[in-house]
Amino acid sequence: MGSIIEFKNVTKKFNQRAVLDHLDISIPRGKITFIVGKSGEGKSVTIKHIMGLLKPDEGRIVVNGEDITDFEHDQLREYRKKFGMLFQHAALFDSMTVGQNVIFPLKEHTKMPLDEMLKRVERVLEQVGLPNMQHKYPTELSTGEKKRVGLARALVSRPEIILYDEPTTGMDPLVSEMIDELIVHVNKEIQGITSIVISHDLKAALGTAEYIVFLYKGKVALAGSPEDFKTTKDPVVRQFFSGKVSGPMEFL
């Protein structure tokens, strides 16, 4: 299937500190990839480069075979239509119904006929397990339901790539497990979609991911399957995944 996103020797500095340090990443097409690492290791900066919100100081970024490094504003606006995004707190509009929240990207970015939009909304709400919820407001929903609505809104434009930003942070274990199952369900349900999850949730990474990228000091410390992470002898990776303070990993 090959790679859908490649970072080639990417460096990004802030105040002379290299957050990304000659970073090479290859994210497989059509799979669930978790990008993990402790705070400040460049996970969010990596996502911002994928979205074109930041440009590298050095190196190239290739998405779906296209070098996006030097894209101008109009090119980036078109390029970002490839993506859906589920934010950490769902980021719903409280004054809008579920249906209005989900249809919002279609009204803003397409000229699709209204009846087609409504069918699309109905379909994605079914995909995330919320049929017939269009008329409810966010205040009437549970935390898990809000996440599902946020995901439906991210999916409604039929993106090639969906980005999950810390989707289970602050959630209780039952909601976290539901979200993990939902990520797997969506990746199976929607043919060809690629899911990228930024997360501190190591249990979710090992149980949900098909591919894991572990960032440390601006580089990839290890990239591979969950089994690769369970069996690695790398002391930094083992320390992080065991949750122990003592070890070679530096804490700032």
Image (cartoon, rainbow, N blue to C red):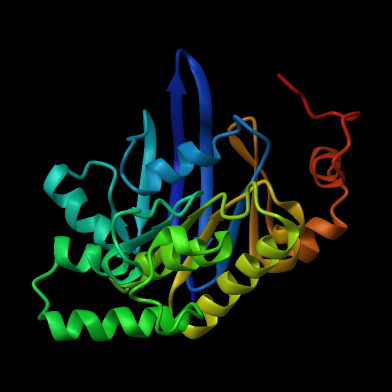
Residue at 48% across, 70% down: 2
Residue at 45% across, 31% down: 11
- Is residue 26 at all visible to an observer of this figure? yes
- Is residue 190 at all visible to an observer of this figure? no
| Number of numbered labels in the structure image | 0
* Quadrant in which the C terminus appears: top right
Q: Position of residue 209 (x, y in %)?
A: 65, 65
In the displayed structure, 223 sits above or below 194; it is above
Q: Quadrant of residue 15?
A: top left
Task: Looking at this view, name the residue that lies furthest to the front.
Answer: 140
The answer to whether 67 appears left or right of 40 in the picture is left
Q: Quadrant of residue 111?
A: bottom left
User: Which of 148 and 234 lies nearest the eye of the viewer?
Assistant: 148
User: Which of 96 and 169 lies nearest the eye of the viewer?
Assistant: 96
Q: Quadrant of residue 101?
A: bottom left
Q: Position of residue 114 (x, y in %)?
A: 13, 80
In the displayed structure, 187 sits above or below 40; it is below
Residue at 68% across, 67% down: 208
In the displayed structure, 239 sits above or below 217; it is below
Q: Position of residue 18 (x, y in %)?
A: 52, 23
The answer to whether 168 appears left or right of 68 in the picture is right
